[in-house]
Image (spheres, grey):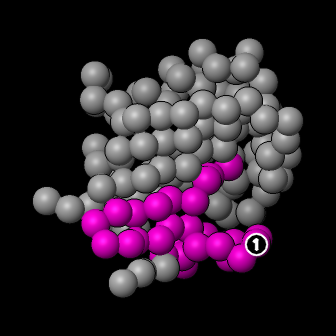
Amino acid sequence: MFEFITLPEQLPPVAPYSHAVRAGDFLFVTGQLAEDPETGQVIKGPIETQTTQVMENLKQVLEHAGTCFEKVVMARVFVTDFRYYDVVNRIYSSYFQLGRYPGRTAVGVTGLAGFGDVEIDLIVYCGD
């Protein structure tokens, strides 16, 4: 069984995807950019601002799906410049309990949709 989750309070996705898909005990959260939920525009500016918005967007998807960062088992972080790596890590880690971080992959990319500088997707375990 699959459950396709789209947040009604956000603008419709700009491409054919769901904000998350529940498959059994797992939730697969689509990569989030620093998109302003009110305008649908990717926020430009400092990497701190972008990363915080990405994490807040992920938090909103998780809450809508009835879960939280504590249940994340895997994250993938995409950045356009590894000079941002330390800042992204600092903000990213503040959303998790100290020492209880999910598995993670970090990838440097030449570009992201919407021309953002950071995108993060998640895999969440929703079982007991």
**Residue found 71% across the figure and 76% down from its top:** 16
User: Number of marks in the image?
Assistant: 1
Left/right placement of residue 41 relative to residue 62 reads: right
Q: Position of residue 10 (x, y in %)?
A: 60, 70
Query: Quick one: 7 or 110, which is closer to the camera?
Result: 110
Over which residues does the magenta segment extend?
A: 5-33
Decide which of 70, 40 is in the foreground and name it: 70
Residue 49 visible at all: no
Query: In the shown orientation, is residue 114 left or right of residue 90?
Result: right
From the top left corner, tell me how far across and down residue 9 is, in percent. Answer: 55, 73
Query: Which residue is nearer to you in this view: 74 or 87?
Result: 74
Q: As shown in the figure, which amino acid type bears the numbered disc 1? A: Ala
The relative height of residue 73 versus residue 41 in the rendered view (above or below) is above
- Please give the residue where the numbered disc 1 appears in the rendered image: 15
Res. 15 image quadrant: bottom right
On screen, residue 109 above or below 89: below
Q: Residue placed at 74% from the left, 63% from the top?
A: 40
Q: Is residue 119 left or right of residue 125?
A: right
Measuring from the top left, give residue 81's x and y in whole percent.
78, 24
Per the image, is 80 magenta?
no
**Figure quadrant of the C terminus:** bottom left
Residue 26 magenta-highlighted: yes
Q: Residue at x 28, y 43 (%)?
A: 70
Q: Is residue 44 above or below residue 31?
A: above
Residue plotted at (68% across, 49% down)? 33
Name above or below for residue 65 compared with residue 88.
below
The picture quadrant where one finds residue 36 is: bottom right
The extreme bottom residue here reads 1
